[in-house]
Image (spheres, rainbow, N blue to C red):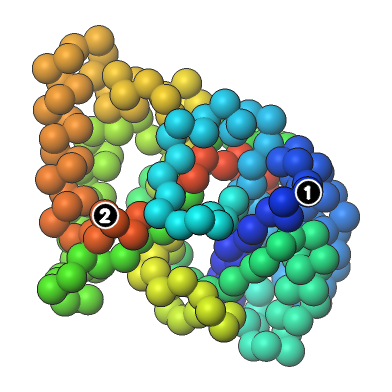
């Protein structure tokens, strides 16, 4: 079983809601009807994420808007061709990556029936190692130090690490990984909730300081892309 993640760009003349409706509707049917597909989740903008624009971090003029995760028997070009055709029909652009997925924190609290919107908001964050750090040191910090800091300082209910094995599309951004983190929606724009500070400014600064120290140690912060999205699970493994 392999996981393919397709980062997607929204057409300029299509609303967030219209794109969501298409992705979780006809596009999902086409993908799930493709031989060898066993799981599908969609992270995309919708009416909920429109109010979360202040939390968005982007360094580019034409940022992506979401990601489609597909679990397949084979990620070979011929086997994924129908999936990519379905996505290209409704997006401005897609880039695919073969992933190794790990789940340090499974979502057990913000759940929904298959096909419905997951309660809360998923921060979709693309990361690049800082200059001068070895790949092994980057992975070690991400998987050990950052995991601990994230769990202790944030109100996350879901944490998925996607380590990029290789890009599957020409012109794919040279990220090393993509993180999916679930937060209560109200926390996305409220640092006091985000950092589990319980109303204490001192605790807020302490937790935020730990987070800044950790991410600065292994990430190129000038290349961070982070976007609030809504999660729709269309088929589980």
Which comes before the other along the chain, label 2 or label 1? 1
Measured from the top left, where is residue 156 in percent x and y? 38, 35
Measured from the top left, where is residue 30 in percent x and y? 85, 64
- What residue is drawn where x is 64% and y is 68%? 94
Q: Is residue 24 above or below residue 79?
A: above
Measured from the top left, where is residue 12 in percent x and y? 72, 51
Instruction: Give residue 100's quadrant in the image.
Output: bottom left
Disc 2, SS: helix
Which sits in the foreground, 137 or 223? 223
Disc 1, SS: loop
Q: Is residue 186 left or right of residue 213?
A: right
Q: Is residue 214 left or right of residue 75?
A: left
Q: Is residue 207 above or below residue 127?
A: above
Instruction: Give residue 204's quadrant in the image.
Output: top left
The numbered dot on residue 133 is none
Q: Which residue is mark 2?
A: 221
Which residue reaches farthest front?
A: 61
Instruction: Give residue 196's quadrant in the image.
Output: top left
The numbered dot on residue 13 is 1
Q: How many residues crowd mark 1 within 10 Å: few (<14), some (14–19), many (20+)?
A: few
Residue 109 in sight here: no
Q: How many residues crowd mark 2 within 10 Å: few (<14), some (14–19), many (20+)?
A: some
Residue 1 in sight here: yes
């Amino acid at each position: 079983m392999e996981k393919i993640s397709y980062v997607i760009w929204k057409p300029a003349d299509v609303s967030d809601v219209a794109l969501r409706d298409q992705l979780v509707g006809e596009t999902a049917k086409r993908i799930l009807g493709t031989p060898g597909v066993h799981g599908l989740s969609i992270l995309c903008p919708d009416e909920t994420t429109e109010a979360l624009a202040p939390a968005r971090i982007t360094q580019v003029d034409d940022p992506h808007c979401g990601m489609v995760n597909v679990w397949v028997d084979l990620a070979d070009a011929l086997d994924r061709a129908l999936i990519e055709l379905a996505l290209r029909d409704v997006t401005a652009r897609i880039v695919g990556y073969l992933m190794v997925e790990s789940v340090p924190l499974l979502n057990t609290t913000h759940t929904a029936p298959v096909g419905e919107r997951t309660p809360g908001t998923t921060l979709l964050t693309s990361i690049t190692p800082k200059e001068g750090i070895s790949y092994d040191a980057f992975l070690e910090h991400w998987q050990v130090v950052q995991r601990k800091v994230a769990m202790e300082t944030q109100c996350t209910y879901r944490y998925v690490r996607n380590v990029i094995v290789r890009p599957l599309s020409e012109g794919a951004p040279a990220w090393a990984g993509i993180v999916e983190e679930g937060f209560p929606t109200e926390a996305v724009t409220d640092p006091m909730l985000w950092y589990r500070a319980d109303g204490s400014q001192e605790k807020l600064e302490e937790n935020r300081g730990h987070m800044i120290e950790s991410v600065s140690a292994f990430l190129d912060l000038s290349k961070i892309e982070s976007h609030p999205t809504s999660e729709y699970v269309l088929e589980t493994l």
